[in-house]
């Protein structure tokens, strides 16, 4: 019994000590009001270790989007974004940054606007201003990036394409770039699921690039693009189509094909590429 108690105390001591180590940031779960969506919206936020000790310092921000049927807790709990960020910041492979993981899975899972669900408007007109008003952020395009997986990867592409003045970098992982009609886990008789995937198709990333005029294309070139997709991912072919559309539009980007599928193992490993990438794009 004494041995068990000693082990428990040792674990608690190590956990407490880790929280005090230099370079050890933390993830917090918060909420904010939204008039557009008429409800409280949750988010997770990673704050670097110096955030509470250096009150004069401001930080660039990465908005990190979860996938379909997910939540704001996915990246912290399944992708272990806090641990990865602490490792990369401590090793100087990534700069100190704030990472915001918004909730898009509650009530109606979608990142795009519809008449009764203006999530994209909420993101740009409420969420970003709220974060910049309540945290010590470096503001402006050169200090803001967006990244995401699957449906959040598609939203990453759409957001950076439609709002290139907002982001210096976009990192899209395993992106669900248009509707896939052969997904056996989707109940196409469910009107809610059908509408969600129709909104994805209404915001088809390939068509978005193909139909962009020259002014829009030139604006997209101001964003640093990175597309990351596994060779066993069901979105692989669609991501290749997106890459070809970008190439034909002469929009520069980096593209990585790695071994893996549509899984958290893949997305967790992608963070070790994504955080250094956006760090290089932030204004130093």
Image: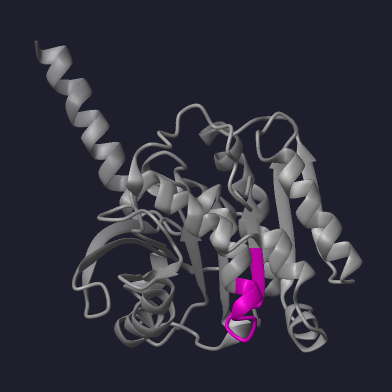
User: Quadrant of the image for the N terminus?
Assistant: top left
Q: Nearer the viewer, residue 37 or 59?
A: 37
Q: Residue at x 39, y 48 (%)?
A: 76
Q: Residue at x 38, y 45 (%)?
A: 193
* The stretch drawn in magenta includes residue 116: no
Magenta stretch?
160-170
Q: Nearer the viewer, residue 187 or 130?
A: 187
Across and down, in percent, residue 42 comes to 26, 62
- Residue 92 shows in this picture: no
Q: Nearer the viewer, residue 50 or 97?
A: 97
182 relative to 124 in the view: left or right:
right
254 relative to 149 in the view: left or right:
right
Q: Residue at x 80, y 47 (%)?
A: 240
98 relative to 253 in the view: left or right:
left
Across and down, in percent, residue 213 comes to 78, 83
Q: Residue at x 88, y 63 (%)?
A: 247
Across and down, in percent, residue 135 comes to 34, 80
The quarter of the displayed image where residue 209 is located: bottom right
- Residue 164 shows in this picture: yes
């Amino acid at each position: 019994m004494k041995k068990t108690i000693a082990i428990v105390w040792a674990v608690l001591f190590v956990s407490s000590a880790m929280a005090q180590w230099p370079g050890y940031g933390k993830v917090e779960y918060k909420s904010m009001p939204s008039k557009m969506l008429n409800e409280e919206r949750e988010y997770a936020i990673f704050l670097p270790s110096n955030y509470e000790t250096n009150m004069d310092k401001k930080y660039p921000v990465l908005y990190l989007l979860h996938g379909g049927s997910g939540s704001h807790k996915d990246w912290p709990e399944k992708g272990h974004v806090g641990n990865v960020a602490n490792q990369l910041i401590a090793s100087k492979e990534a700069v100190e940054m704030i990472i915001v993981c918004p909730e898009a899975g509650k009530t109606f899972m979608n990142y795009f606007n519809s008449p009764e669900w203006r999530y994209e408007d909420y993101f740009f007109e409420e969420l970003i201003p709220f974060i910049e008003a309540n945290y010590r952020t470096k503001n402006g395009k050169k200090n803001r990036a967006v990244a995401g997986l699957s449906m959040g990867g598609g939203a990453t592409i759409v957001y950076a394409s439609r709002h290139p003045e907002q982001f210096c970098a976009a990192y899209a992982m395993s992106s669900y770039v248009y509707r896939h009609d052969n997904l056996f886990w989707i109940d196409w008789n469910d009107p809610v699921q059908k509408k969600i995937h129709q909104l994805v198709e209404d915001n088809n990333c390939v068509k978005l690039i193909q139909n962009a005029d020259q002014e829009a294309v030139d604006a997209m070139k101001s964003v640093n693009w990175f597309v990351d997709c596994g060779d066993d991912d069901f979105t692989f072919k669609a991501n290749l189509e997106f890459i070809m559309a970008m190439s034909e539009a002469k929009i520069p980007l980096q593209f990585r094909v790695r071994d893996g599928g549509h899984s958290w193992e893949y997305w967790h490993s992608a963070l070790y590429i994504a955080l250094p990438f956006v760090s290089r794009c932030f204004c130093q």
